[in-house]
Image (cartoon, coloured by chain):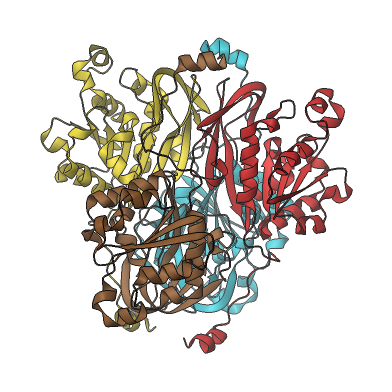
Chain colours: A cyan, B brown, C yellow, D red
Amino acid sequence: MIKVTVWNEYYHEKVDENVAKLYPCGIHNAIAEFLRQDDEVIVRTVSLDNPECGLSEDVLDDTDVLIWWSHLLHDKVPDEIAQRVKTHVLKGMGFIPLHSSHFCKPFIALMGTACTLRWRDDDRERVWCVDPGHPIANGIPEYFELEREEMYGEHFDIPAPDELIFLGWFKGGEVFRSGCTFKRGYGKIFYFQPGHEEYPTYYNEYVQKIIKNAVHWAAPQNRRKTIEAPRAISPEADLEKNNL
Amino acid sequence: MIKVTVWNEYYHEKVDENVAKLYPCGIHNAIAEFLRQDDEVIVRTVSLDNPECGLSEDVLDDTDVLIWWSHLLHDKVPDEIAQRVKTHVLKGMGFIPLHSSHFCKPFIALMGTACTLRWRDDDRERVWCVDPGHPIANGIPEYFELEREEMYGEHFDIPAPDELIFLGWFKGGEVFRSGCTFKRGYGKIFYFQPGHEEYPTYYNEYVQKIIKNAVHWAAPQNRRKTIEAPRAISPEADLEKNNL
Amino acid sequence: MIKVTVWNEYYHEKVDENVAKLYPCGIHNAIAEFLRQDDEVIVRTVSLDNPECGLSEDVLDDTDVLIWWSHLLHDKVPDEIAQRVKTHVLKGMGFIPLHSSHFCKPFIALMGTACTLRWRDDDRERVWCVDPGHPIANGIPEYFELEREEMYGEHFDIPAPDELIFLGWFKGGEVFRSGCTFKRGYGKIFYFQPGHEEYPTYYNEYVQKIIKNAVHWAAPQNRRKTIEAPRAISPEADLEKNNL
Amino acid sequence: MIKVTVWNEYYHEKVDENVAKLYPCGIHNAIAEFLRQDDEVIVRTVSLDNPECGLSEDVLDDTDVLIWWSHLLHDKVPDEIAQRVKTHVLKGMGFIPLHSSHFCKPFIALMGTACTLRWRDDDRERVWCVDPGHPIANGIPEYFELEREEMYGEHFDIPAPDELIFLGWFKGGEVFRSGCTFKRGYGKIFYFQPGHEEYPTYYNEYVQKIIKNAVHWAAPQNRRKTIEAPRAISPEADLEKNNL
């Protein structure tokens, strides 16, 4: 079983009635709902207003993959908790920041870059697959469309991704590296661009399939208990052991 | 000085009067002309109808960077000569296949994949830079436009590029990895998508700048005389030499 | 279920009694034997002396992952069959060339480089893991030792791997990129260096674990029926469909 | 001209007479000395005990490539100054952290990982080149030896490098990714492992050549004035301009 925690700042849904209509229980619960169709996944949802932002050491120790959605309240996550999330990723926890989470503290800290991008409201997007053999692209057609999505455009200031899976085309004239993987320490990261709160993106079948696939891909095989340096091998011990 | 050889199948310009008007001396000579503005570059042009396709061992030995344009006559290049070009790349010669040269024999042999792509005539392209610190992007704005260009779209069946520098956006709804680098052996390869023979692409200032930059980037520092395996180090010799 | 075909040139085991003692049924059957401990894997073995080298279209259509071992008889595989294997990889079949198979025809054709390396008989190897979070490294310690192994050393003339998982240290003074992944088309490739026929490498628990892991990693999610180019999208059709 | 600033914590040379004998004017001045043989390079040296650690905005604005050496006093560099260095890298300044600088604050912040490694005093190293066509490898043989060097071993907890150029072999049994490039924002980074303060590493001709090469490679072509996000393109403006 893969233990997934879906984190949401959970703000727009409370203060904007249009968003509330789309996601009455919050984006985190909409994501949880489709993930629960997967028998190999156990899902928990947490949000900013939980104690410790819902991201205690216990919760993270019990999380295989953390999905993250934030937009306006990035800075309400204390530095200490952002650092804690980063450390858990380096120890092996999978991490899937969605859409505007390109600017969340743990992602910026893991990337080491500014993570800036170009943006504009309300465009039409076509998501193209450029790595159709990748597990995250399993079951996804050559391209699919999002009738309305916020435009995110290049230059996206990230390190060159380890793998580039999806490219976004926007009617207004921009392109974006919309689905990217990164490995940091023992942890696997998948950034996925679609998911503006004003549009029903998380009800799109392909968006759901991609996030499901990404959960399986990001689930750790190996984890480490600490990010301390490995022990130096004593050459003398090695000499004895190996008859060097 | 960087010695550049520009190779062209030189066919459309002879049989299509519209192409002939655009490139009266052939695409190869149009490219050579703007490269000659660069004092550090010496340019020669050759084409399919030269002896040995203009690609004798002597010519290739005397070439730092080979620029290639072909479209309908890929198969007129004998396998032996395509293999010769590949070997020179592996020994260190730079290689810049342009546009429809994604299907030329040396590129396919160097990639190891099918190099297929999606295409359609007559679209509008916007070329975006996704690696603005790259030497090949020097002097190129965030994006530039080609009012008319042939659409090339994903999935482009190439290995994941070592570096992705430009992405193409097409008005009709497609995206493309338009500027990609690959290292193979000692040689540096830059594939660049714009350059359909029916449009004045090679007169665009940014296309010219990119090709000039790419020549400098692809020029070899180290070359090897053979692609034979390196000599095994004799452990005995090492023992003596290094007191292992 | 993952359908694995293990291919072996099956020569040394017939002509060298020391090798025959180590691998009385051939290296392919030694590999098959430990793979069969995995309930999710079905294994078939084939060798050079089978009709069509055991690599008919039917066999390859029915293969998810092809494991390959060859050394002295690379050239006995006809070009047509090597090309067939390559095409199946590009369509999605996983491919795991072992040890001296760095010089087998399908691997060279997929890499596009010379695939040369430095070598020497009879050394001691220590295999280090540099990507401990990778699925292929699952269950593998920081390093493990092979008391006797043939030395393979750099420079290994391959494209930069998509992922570098293992590095080999040799007592005589060399290093090697011993475990590398590549994606080509829809297919996943894992090259793994250990496995000289004169040593009991394939009985090492970690070597077995790595090959088992690699089979799961290389098994295709998506396959394509052809490596033909994708259909051009008609902009008119798109206009109708999408109200562009 | 390439403006190089060499930064050193400058501590061991003051408190350890053996180090002082090797590097009487400090490691930074030893590096500056051989760089000054290059007519295209202007060198300045600074150290921790300068005002603002020698790393004022003015100095960094006037620096094309920053070379960094620190070991015991990483934490004496204030967070604000480390952040300043990182920002300048993201804007385009080249950055070459040497040896124990794998643990300096700007490198850790740029990598986003723990940057831990395995280490041991006093071993013999052989540095192998695995990317002989790279500009940083220009003039470097297949391998070279450092009779005495501190052992740095895997697992080195860094993101997968954009390019891997050198691998270190250590007599005691370890390997290391000793020469790695990374691009972050507009800046180019080259981490190079050799250079323990107790050994005459920086007098080795190949070490000197590699650092000289790296200065040329890391010098920026494009720089940006800010790491702010790019301006959103107004679709209306585009409509007018481009007749979309």
Q: Nearer the viewer, residue C156 or D29?
A: D29
Query: Residue furthest toward the left?
Result: C51
Quarter location, residue D127: top right
Q: Is residue C119 visible?
A: yes
Horizontally, residue A166 falls left or right of residue B141, namely left
Instruction: Report the number of numbered marks.
Output: 0
Check the picture and name the quadrant holding the N terminus of chain D: bottom right
* Above or below, D221 relative to C235: above
Quarter location, residue B6: bottom left
Report x, y in % for residue A97. 56, 58
Report x, y in % for residue A79. 73, 53
Q: Nearer the viewer, residue A155 or B29?
A: B29
* Above or below, C90 relative to D147: below
Report x, y in % for residue A37. 41, 57
Horizontally, residue C207 falls left or right of residue C52, namely right
Q: Is residue C146 visible?
A: no
Q: Nearer the viewer, residue B197 or C214?
A: B197
Q: Nearer the viewer, residue A126 or D11?
A: D11
* Above or below, A78 relative to D155: below
Horizontally, residue A86 falls left or right of residue C118, namely right
Report x, y in % for residue B203. 45, 76
